[in-house]
Image (spheres, grey):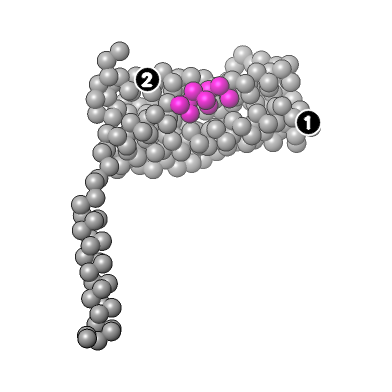
Amino acid sequence: MGHPLLQTVLHYAVLLVVWWRVVLTAPVPDQSTACLDALSSVTGITATLHYDAELLLVDYERIHEFKGESIPEYVPDATVSGATHAEKLYNVAVKELLFSWHLGVVEEDQTNFWDLIDASLLQKFVTAKSRLSNHSQTIKDLLKVVDPDFTTPTMPATPELNNTHSYTKKLYGWAVLSNLKDLAANLIIEIDTMTKNGICGEDVQN
């Protein structure tokens, strides 16, 4: 019989060789499939984000009896900008980081400034923030598949807010929610266009 220690070493050596062969022969996930999966996730959650943002805006207008007619310059716009698919996804990812911050400020104003205790409105803020966070991650996931070497989205500097009075706070809150809803609506259209233009490698005809 051989030495026990030598047998153990040989045993693990055989296991290592088998494992290494499995690793080398394991199927590599198809890039197109990964892209389509990420695109499907973005498509679904974008529609849900738009729905939740719209419900939140409607409740905000009802509670505050207010509907703005202008957007303060320090509120992120609702456009999707960029020359390529990756640039557009990056633009949305960065913009959503800012919207997340603004949404948190508006939520805090409901209790800290307005002293509101409307459970329906406050719950809709919680839902919209969670949905936006999930949506932001799916956008980043899709960007990583579309262009792995593209710059990772990071939080830009937050603006100084000039909204210490009742009217300016109402307008600010309304503008943030309105533009968030419009961003989601614009992104629904943009994602459909990206799909048709072959973001995952194939043009899709009507």
In the rendered view, does 72 fall on the left or right side of 35? Answer: right
x then y, percent, for residue 194? 33, 23
Give the residue at mark 1: 117
Q: Which of 178 and 33 is in front in this view?
A: 33
Asked whether 45 falls inside the magenta stretch, the response is: yes
Magenta span contains residue 121: no
Q: In this view, does 80 lie to the left or right of 131?
A: left
Marks 1/2: CA–CA distance: 39 Å
Going 24% across and 25% down the picture, which residue do you hit?
Answer: 202
- Which segment did they paint magenta? 44-53
Q: Quadrant of residue 204?
A: top left
Q: Which residue is drawn at 62% across and 21% down?
A: 55
Instruction: Indicate the amino acid at tag 2.
Output: Asp
Choose between 140 and 72: the one closer to the eye. Answer: 140
The N terminus appears in which quarter of the rendering?
Answer: bottom left
Along the polypeptide, which appears first: circle 1 or circle 2? 1
Residue 125's image quarter? top right
Local SS, label 1: loop
Q: How crowded is mark 2: few (under 14 residues within 10 Å), some or many (20 or more)?
A: few
Do callouts 1 and 2 mark residues in contact (Cβ within 8 Å)?
A: no
Residue 162 in view of the camera:
no
User: Residue 192's mark?
Assistant: 2
Q: How many marks?
A: 2
